[in-house]
Amino acid sequence: MATNPYPRTKRGAERREQILRAAEVMIGTQGFSAASIADITRHAKTALGTFYIYFSSKEDVFRELVLEMGQLTRAMVTEAVADAPNRLEAERAGLKAFLRFVAERPSLYRIVEEARFIDVEAYKAYFTNFAKAYAAQLREAEASGELRPGDAEVRAWALMGIAKTLGERYVLWDETADIDHVVDEAYSMIRDGIAP
Amino acid sequence: MATNPYPRTKRGAERREQILRAAEVMIGTQGFSAASIADITRHAKTALGTFYIYFSSKEDVFRELVLEMGQLTRAMVTEAVADAPNRLEAERAGLKAFLRFVAERPSLYRIVEEARFIDVEAYKAYFTNFAKAYAAQLREAEASGELRPGDAEVRAWALMGIAKTLGERYVLWDETADIDHVVDEAYSMIRDGIAP
């Protein structure tokens, strides 16, 4: 039976979404190897066979979660920085929004990191797509004089590295950290590092 | 039989080292789950039983590799920055040395990242120990006026995040990248971000 990645009925879309959310919980907490398809459908309160209507394998649902995480992260950051008066303030707002997102969806963070070992192409695509869009924005801001000249691509990866590592250290590992303080300190370094 | 983590004879030390190096190659290229102890001893050209003289399990040799990677990275960075005339130049030298180290030992990099899923305590210890030493140096440099005031711990993690992410993007994924250019661009951002 062919899988049906884009169900046409509302019921189909809801069921597929239910399975995705269950996969996020099970893979995000137990890891890819330990979480079985049976665990996922049990958690989704659906029959085992239903899984195969929408996904061909555990690898398939995993890849979908990584793709979804990429879309979610980009959409969330884009929205968070939409009202920023300039690129520097957008950096602060984006970093803060990312750290909040990690706090809200820790399992998706873990899924992306595990992709390095399960589906390296999805892993690379996640960061490469993000970096491409990020670098384009930095380039624009440089052109309009909001940032001083520099290699936008290297900057994008360096800034992603800061966000990723602070997210792990101060959000995933430490539920009591003062996120605003972390953002202020990191932002002060970032601002003076790229301000005109 | 009890394992013998610190062999007293030269021959014992050599054999243990041979197994560690084989484990680095096999786990570093195939991943923790796929690499078996039989693969490791075959690659080390030693009998399967010899493994158990020095290590109690695959988890045990893996933890040892992560610990070793931490010691190696710290020793390598310490040596690389020893001649730097000040903290800012030490940042540049440290970043460059780290990226060269990733190029030379890509398997150890992968092992540390996989530790997040295999031995999270070893993973946290790797980064936490590094960050502690790093923050202490940043604090000293701040006290002597080489850096402007700031939260040394947040800075240490942010700087580690830059190095880690640039290492993945420009060394592991891209063997043709101009490392000196990447270091120059990242350093320019770091320097102005923390200079007095």
Image (spheres, coloured by chain):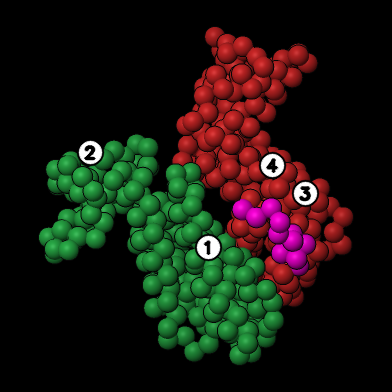
Chain colours: A green, B red
Q: Nearer the viewer, residue B131 or B76?
A: B76
Which secondary structure, mark 4?
A: loop
Which secondary structure, mark 1?
A: helix
Apparent side of residue A82 relative to residue B189 in the rendered image (left or right): left
Q: Residue B9, image x and y in percent?
A: 76, 13
Q: What whole-number distance in Å separates the C-alpha atoms at marks 3 and 2?
A: 50 Å
Q: Name the residue type under label 1.
A: Thr
Q: Tell me the tag on residue B105.
A: 4
Between circles 1 and 3, the one closer to the viewer is 1
Q: Tell me the tag on residue A38.
A: 2
Report if residue B169 is visible in the image. yes
Q: Which residue is mark 3?
A: B78
Pinpoint the chain carrying mark 2: A
Q: Name the residue type under label 4.
A: Arg
Q: What whole-number distance in Å separates the C-alpha atoms at marks 1 and 2?
A: 33 Å
Same chain assignment for discs 1 and 4 = no
Q: Quadrant of residue B91?
A: bottom right
Q: Pointer 2: residues within 10 angstroms few (<14), some, or many (20+)?
A: some
Q: Quadrant of residue A78?
A: bottom left
Apparent side of residue A51 relative to residue A111 in the rendered image (left or right): left
